[in-house]
DNA sequence: ATAAACAGCTATATAATATAGCAATTAGTC
DNA sequence: GACTAATTGCTATATTATATAGCTGTTTAT
């Protein structure tokens, strides 16, 4: 039997829980031909019609250099519309096809959330959320 | 003010907590010229002298195709030794230089763990760990 | 009017992963 | 003992999410 130096490591177990979730989610989204990042961008646009991509990037912590091809692909696939709001920015919104896709994403996310909620056991959801937000904020430089 | 569809999303907050931790850790390890994955491999080897790289890969869930260059780099840098144990496998162990590196890694990890422990607030460490392991195991396919 | 900040973008690099496939070795079964 | 199956280490290559540097044009602030 081998010794596992990460058995009681908080950070390692946090990471494994997160990556297990992400890879499961990626599998679910594959049926929609979407990557998790694209799905998250689509949800933010749907929740904020007319939002500029720089704002989406700030909300999700995605650099503008990475937002450009991401938005480009969603546009190419006909899921979003871009309307100029000034000389440099476009307001983004989901179109009918995007709205359908968003509905499918929400279904997947809800079942994903249910699995996590189930794994919480006795731990109240609000406590879990508060702890995650504290770790996030305190560990980011 | 923009609507944040992930404000109360368990999975998203889990992911952000995890990536904040990983990127902080990557920054700390950069001083040792090590990536987080390399550091984790080194810790497993140190805890299990003579372990084969296939076993390290199984413990950390790293494919053999990805283990090969990883171990190669640690060997090239003079941190580990490889001794043949049979016709196809080598037993791995850290050498003196690797042991020093491991000590430095452990120091970094301990301060990282302290930050996470601090963010737990009232939540007992064992509860956090148990929840992470349940999420991990239940969400991986 | 001019400087600074901002938006969107290209090109490129890195880290962690994945799949496919292969050669050599070892283990299991008849 | 022979044969098949599994294992080990590996190369080559692709994908995803991320990063930096730098550019153009637009808007804002002094």
Image (tube, coloured by chain):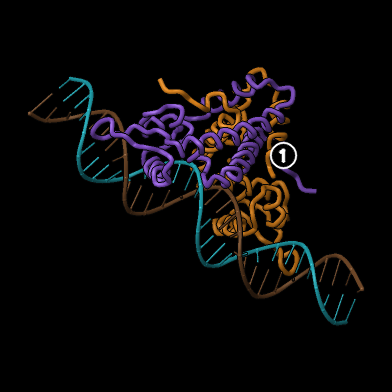
Chain colours: A purple, B orange, C brown, D cyan
What residue sits 40% from the left and 33% below the top? A93
Left or right of residue A62, residue B64 in this image: right
Q: Chain of mark 1?
A: B
Which one is nearer the viewer's eye here, B63 or A101? Answer: A101
What residue sits 73% from the left and 49% below the top? B48
Left or right of residue B49, residue B24 in this image: left
The outermost residue toward the front is: A96
Left or right of residue A120, residue D17 in this image: left
Which one is nearer the viewer's eye here, A102 or B118? Answer: A102
Tell me the residue that label 1 is attached to.
B137
Secondary structure of residue under mark 1? helix
Which one is nearer the viewer's eye here, B57 or B87? Answer: B57
User: Where D27 falls versus A1 (above or below)?
Assistant: above
What residue sits 60% from the left and 40% below the top? A25
Give the image location of residue B74, x and y in percent.
Answer: 58, 55
Which one is nearer the viewer's eye here, A88 or B32? Answer: A88
Give the image location of residue C21, x and y in percent.
Answer: 62, 70
Q: Can see residue B78?
A: no
What residue sits 68% from the left and 50% below the top? B45
User: Where B42 falls versus A108 (above or below)?
Assistant: below
């Amino acid at each position: 039997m081998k010794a596992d130096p990460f058995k009681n490591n908080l950070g390692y177990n946090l990471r494994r829980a997160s990556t297990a979730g992400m890879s499961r989610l990626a599998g679910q989204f594959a049926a929609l031909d979407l990557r998790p990042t694209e799905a998250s961008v689509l949800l933010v646009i749907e929740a904020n019609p007319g939002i500029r991509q720089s704002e989406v990037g700030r909300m999700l912590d995605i650099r503008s250099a990475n937002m450009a091809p991401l938005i480009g692909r969603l546009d190419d696939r006909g899921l979003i519309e871009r309307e100029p709001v000034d000389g440099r920015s476009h307001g983004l919104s989901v179109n009918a096809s995007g709205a359908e896709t968003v509905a499918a994403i929400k279904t997947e996310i809800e079942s994903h959330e249910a699995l996590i909620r189930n794994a919480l056991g006795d731990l109240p959801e609000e406590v879990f959320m508060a702890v995650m937000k504290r770790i996030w904020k305190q560990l980011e430089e």
